[in-house]
Image (spheres, rainbow, N blue to C red):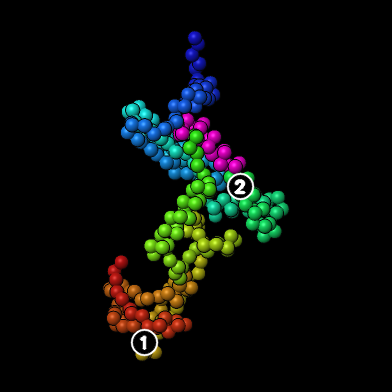
Amino acid sequence: MEVPSKYDPTLVEDRWYAYWMEHGFFRSTPDNREPYCIVIPPPNVTGVLHMGHMLNNTLQDVLIRRARMQGKNALWVPGTDHASIATEARVVQMLAGKGIRKADLAREEFLDHAWQWKEKHGGIILEQLKKLGASCDWERTRFTMDEALSESVIRVFVDLFNKGYIYRGVRMVNWDPAARTAVSDEEVNYREVKSKLYYIRYRVENEDSFLTIATTRPETILGDTAVCVHPDDERYRELHGRRVLVPLIERSVPVIVDAY
């Protein structure tokens, strides 16, 4: 038999993966063996996998295959994540390319487009995992918006609410003016910009003198609870322990010192 000088994965990988699938080597059913289970951190259905997914899933595959070789009942549960805000943004972008505005669609019409996106890109992601050789139990594939999972989320949410762990409150939030929704810190993309440095005067309480501070975020001064100065800065030594008034709302706050 002639051995090729270069490795051609197409001649080997697809054939062996099909063999593994045909014989159910990745399937797991409960028995008396020691269980070993990994639930895949579900990739978002916002596109395709990247190198970070490749590394993460390779490490999981190593662990799950090692457990099988040790005689454990190993189960690797695959799935995908709806990533609602990110997916919505991609769907809106896709529709805009077709000349369709989200505002012109009824709720159910937009959801139909979102599910079509999920079926297309969710399928691509799962096939990419198979190409990677991932030894998941594909009969257990889940999507985070599956009916049973959604019902579980609602049930747990209600339970946490009844226990007092979920409540409404006034908070500073990240606001997406395009999607018109709050987003978590994890979904914020930061970029460096050239901005202005604003100088604002805080009047010293019961005096006509002022303490000037500099900030790039003047909109946050309404939440000020103190003004901090360096203890070794001679300019402000006489203000240690004094109080100043927050501009606009005239709220009295202390002048504190810290070398940080």
Residue drawn at 56 percent across, 47 percent down? 46
The residue that appears at 44% across and 38% down in the rendered structure is: 77
The residue tagged 2 is 115
**The disc labelled 2 sits on which kind of residue?**
Trp
Q: Is residue 18 visible?
A: yes
Judge by depth and name the residue closer to the eye, 189 or 108.
Answer: 108
> Which kind of residue does numbered mark 1 sit on?
Glu
- The picture places residue 78, in percent across and down from the top left corner, at 47, 39
Q: Nearer the viewer, residue 168 or 152?
A: 152
Q: Earlier in the sequence, mark 2 or mark 1?
A: 2
- The correct choice, above or below, for 115 with respect to 158 in the image is above
Relative to 130, 164 lies left or right: left
**For the stretch drawn in magenta, what is the main secondary structure?**
helix
Q: Quadrant of residue 85?
A: bottom right
Q: Residue at x 46, y 34 (%)?
A: 137
Residue 92, x across and y down, in percent: 63, 53
For residue 259, above or below residue 14: below
> Does any portion of residue 51 appear in the rendered image?
no
| Left or right: 57 in relation to 240 | right
Cβ atoms under marks 2 and 1 closer than 8 Å: no
Image x and y of residue 199, in percent: 45, 76
Q: CA distance from mark 2 to mark 1?
A: 60 Å
Q: Which residues are magenta?
A: 119-137
SS category of the residue bearing label 2 = helix
- The numbered dot on residue 205 is 1
- Image point 36% across, 89% down: which residue? 207
x and y percent of residue 198 in the render? 47, 74
Along the line of sight, the residue nearer the viewer: 34 or 212: 34
Q: Image quadrant of residue 260?
A: bottom left
- Tell me if 87 is positioned left or right of 210 in this view: right
- Neighbourhood count class around disc 1 (C-alpha, 10 Å): few under 14, some 14–19, many 20 upward: some
